[in-house]
Amino acid sequence: MPGLAILNYKGGVGKSTLARELAASLARRQQRSLAVDMDPQANLSRRLGFQSSLADPLPTLAGAIKNDVTGGAADILTPCSWNDPLAQYIDLLPSSFDLENRISEAGTVGAVVRLRNIMTGLGGHHWRIYDCAPSLGHLTHMALVAAGAEEECGVLLVTEPEQDGLEGCIKAYEFMEGYAAVLGVPHLRVLGIVINRVRRTELHQENITKLVDRYGSLVWEPHVPLWTTLADAHNSAVPLHTMPGPKADELVTKFETITDRVIKEMAA
């Protein structure tokens, strides 16, 4: 099954947004996705309806990776809890803040393959979508190694057209160019760059032009506008298409187009 990692060195640019909407778009095609939340902020987990608490904590990737039992991810596999038919096509390996504790284990022999190891034998999905942490460190390394274990695999960079986001995108691209082989996944390539949180300002248009000048056709269209409809759907942990108003439909169409491109580039 294809493995797709969503990456940027900077947080808050829309990695979890893109991961969630790709899974939803694939669900509309009756393709099953496994969403792997490797960000300790756990935004993707919450937006797919995962609810845990300090008083009643649920098992997450933090513990499964620590235990490093081959195939152990099956014990934390969680269905999407949306009250919507799309939910049956989306499963989650949830995250939690204590996933941060795995970073200190980076020097342990074999630590970088732990995520791949615990996912061994986990079937029943057409896609695996990895929401990476906003870093280029150990948690992201594990996600990239797991994604690169698939015969079809790729990385999708996402950014907002602000200077910090662009710099994070550039660093992530350069990291993939220089270190994919070091991680043992030389075939794992950047498929494209999705621009999120776009406003109709001169600054945003200038920054988009800079990115296109640098990366050419790697910068995909359509761009995703900064509309409250999208944020409201995510904050409420409900599917985007259930939100009122025409902007929700327009956003769904944009993500469908991006998904078409992912499928095309992954097969290239």
Image: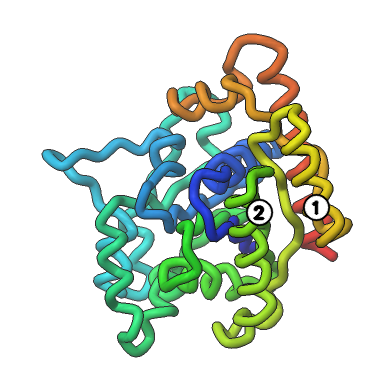
Task: Give the colouring mode of the picture.
Answer: rainbow
Which image quarter is the N terminus in? bottom right
- In the picture of the structure, the residue carrying the numbered disc 1 is 210
The image shows residue 171, relative to residue 254, as above or below, that is: below
Q: Are marks 2 and 1 in contact (CB under 8 Å)?
A: yes
The kind of residue on which mark 2 rests is Leu
Tell me how far mark 2 sits from mark 1, CA to CA: 9 Å
Q: Alpha-carbon neighbours of circle 1 within 10 Å: few (<14), some, or many (≥20)?
A: some
Which image quarter is the C terminus in? bottom right
Q: Disc 1 on helix, strand or loop? A: helix
The image shows residue 262, relative to residue 176, as above or below, that is: above
Question: Which residue is rendered at x = 33% and y = 54% of the image?
Answer: 76
Across and down, in percent, residue 162 comes to 64, 44
Q: For residue 95, which numbered disc appears in the image?
A: none
The image shows residue 211, relative to residue 53, as above or below, that is: below
In the visual, does 218 lie left or right of 40? right
Question: Which residue is rendered at x = 46% and y = 43% of the image?
Answer: 44
- In the picture of the structure, the residue carrying the numbered disc 2 is 166
In the visual, does 133 lie left or right of 9? left
The part of the image, by quadrant, that contains residue 110 is bottom left
Question: Which residue is rendered at x = 47% and y = 63% of the image?
Answer: 135
Across and down, in percent, residue 241 comes to 63, 22
Question: Which residue is rendered at x = 83% and y = 47% of the image?
Answer: 209
Mark 1 or mark 2, which is nearer the start of the sequence? 2
In the visual, does 148 lie left or right of 67? right
